[in-house]
Every structure is written in C-alpha cells, then in structure tokens.
Image (cartoon, helix red, strand yellow):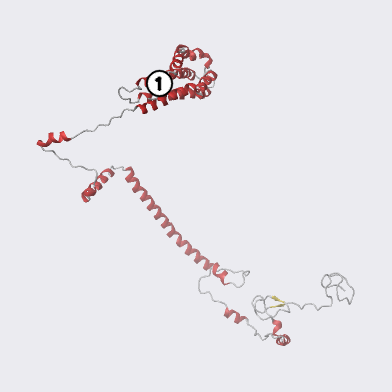
Amino acid sequence: MICPQCHATIDDGTSVCPVCHAYVDAPRPASFLFCEGCGARLSAQERVCPKCGRPAPAILSSESSASDLAAGKTASFPKISQSAIETELPRVSSAVNARSVLDDALDPSVTHVLDASDLAASAKASSSRAPRVRKGVVAAVALVIAAVAVVAFFVLDPLHVTPGLVDSIRESAEDMFPSRQQGETTDQVPEAGKADEDASDTTVETIEDSALSDDSAYEQLHQAYEAVVAINDGERFADAITSFNASYLDPDLETRKSASAGAYALRDELQGIIDDLDAMNLADGSAYTDDREHVRQLALWMYERVDVICASWDISLAVPEDEYPFQHEDEILAPMREAGSSALDNYYAHVGEWEPQEP
C-alpha cells in the first residue's frame, strides 16, 4: 500500500508509516463543500463559512444537526435564497466613484467596474473647477503686480510729485499739531532802540584746542621717540634692506612688488609719526619745544633712510615687462649713491642725547 501522507510504499495493514510516522489507518478527510452564499470552499469539519458567515451545507443535514445538538451547538440555520441576498444589498442612489466602491466592498479582492457615465460626470465636474482656479491665480498675480507698480511709482517718482506730496503732508501736520513741532524759531524783527542793546548782550563762544600740559607733552614725545628707535632697531627695517638686496633685480615683477611692500609700509609709518609731532599743541614757553624738534628730526633722518630704499624700488618696479632689471641696475642704485650716509651718521650721533626726559 502507499502512505497517503508521504506517498511511500509500505506493507499492507501498517497503521503507522515507518517513513513519515503518519497514521495510515486514520480516516481521510471528507471532500470539500462550497458555501451556498459566497461560493467559498469549505471542509466537512467547518460549520460556518469563514468568509461570509453563512452556515455550511453539511450542518443543515439531520445527522449533523443531531451531533451539533448533542454537543451543545445550534444547528438550525435557514437557507438564504439568492433573491434574499440581492434584496439585502445596499442600493446606490448617488454617482458611483472609485472611493465609494472600495469603501462599500465586502471583499477587497473583488474587481469592481465603474460606470462610464459616472466617470464622465466626475471628469466634467473636475474640469469645471479648473477655470475658477486659474481665474483666482490670475487675480492674485494682478494684485501683486499692481502693488509693485505703486511702490515703484513712489520710489522712482517719474513725474516728480513725491517731494511736493511730502511737503504738503508735513505742512498739514504742522498746522494741525503746532505744539509738537520742535527745533523751530520764529523770526522777530528787533526794535530800533534795542538793536545795540541786544547786540551787546550777545557773546560768541570760540572753542580752541587746549595746550598740552608738560606731563601730556612728555608722554606723547616719548612714545614718538620710542617708535622711531623701534623702527631703526627692529627686524622690519632689517628685513626691508635684506628684501631689497635679494629681489631688486628679480625678473618677476610680482616678486619685486611683494619684496618692496615692507619698505613702503615703514615709510608711511614714519610719515604718520612726523604728522603727529607737527599736530602737537604745546603751550607757549613749554619745556618740551626743543624736544619735539629733536624727536621730529630723528624721525626725518629715519624717513630719509627708508625713502632711499623706496626710491630705488620705484625704479626697479618701473622696468618694462619686455626688459630685465639687471639692464637698469645703475639706475636702480643711483638714489642710494646720491644720498650717501649723512642721514645714518646724524641719526646715531644724536639719538642717545635727544631722548625726552621727564619733567
């Protein structure tokens, strides 16, 4: 015999299959039935259709009813005819659309067919709303354009009416609220007899820069002196000289410009120190009159030393692009030869003794 479970060949009379261990002599399940309501396939053990809930045909038999009653189950279910089912279906009174059909469906797997006339009516209703939407959009755009045009008219004022309009509004405000106008004076014509008297009472105040005290003068002079000495002794002046010696004959113009920046910056700084010394307002007979001249002279000597380097840089940077700086070396070094060392010698001869002293 053949095992009904695994289809293996086994001995006749075997109660348990030695291959799959299934009970061979167990009664086979009855053939499937079909629900009379929805047509779903049912087994003999099912009493109610799991899909629509209708009683299965098997439990309406007398044998099944007896067994169900013995087990405490209710087995008396009347048969539902097709006409009864149709009378219980909902009637659609309104236009059918896809959403209503899906919402009313009992089985989502059922295919529904929409009426062509209903679809055409829905499409016509949707198309009738489109012109209204377009009209609304066009109206909104027109309002925006009008607002922009009004603002542009007042801002650009092509007819030159805005100033007059503003003046008229201001005059109206002055007439309506005279007490709120501030900063205005009324012209009054003085009497002839009081003209001289009023003129004699009028005093004109003049603001003059106050002269520096000795303490303030010393502080400013000492700061200027230290600034000049710092330039001479600092690394920036040494770097300016080194950059000139290394790059004034370089064929690349951008390299020469970069190397000359330090010298031009030092010359501008010294010019600022000289301008500040000239702007000092010392009192008449101040003890620091000579000190200011001394510090100014030190700054001038330092300026001349840096200015010579800048003058040579001016010639180096003016070399045409189709020529090389070494072809103009004598011209570039000419300002240094003409200047000599007088500024350097004078600076070191007086820098120590010309330091401002406290009062």
Residue 264 in percent (x, y) is at 46, 23
Q: Residue at x 38, y 51 (%)?
A: 144
Q: Nearer the viewer, residue 335 or 357?
A: 357
Q: Is residue 253 above or below residue 154?
A: above
Q: Name above or below for residue 92 compared with residue 294.
A: below
Residue found at x 51% / y 14%: 329
Q: Quadrant of the C terminus?
A: top left
- The single residue placed furthest to the front in the displayed view is 359
Relative horizontal placement of residue 31, taking residue 348 as reference (left or right): right
The quarter in which the N terminus is drawn is bottom right
Mark yes or no: residue 99 visible. yes
Identify the residue at horizontal 15%, vertical 33% (top origin): 200
Query: Viewer-proximal residue, 287 or 206?
Result: 287
Disc 1: which residue: 295
User: Dot 1, crowdedness within 10 Å: few (<14), some or many (≥20)?
Assistant: many
Q: Quadrant of residue 76?
A: bottom right
78 to the left or right of 234: right
Q: Looking at the picture, does residue 107 appear above or below residue 300? A: below
Q: Indicate the amino acid at tag 1.
A: Val
Q: Residue 262 at what x, y percent from top left?
A: 49, 24
Say left or right for 41 vs 265: right
Give the secondary structure at mark 1.
helix
| Residue appearing at x 53%, y 23% in the figure | 255
Q: Residue furthest right?
A: 11
**Place of residue 190 in the rendered image (x, y in percent of width and height, measured from the top left):** 13, 38
| Whether residue 253 can be seen here | no
Residue 181: x %, y % from top left: 23, 47
Q: Residue furthest left?
A: 193
Given residues 250 and 354, the one toward you in this image is 354
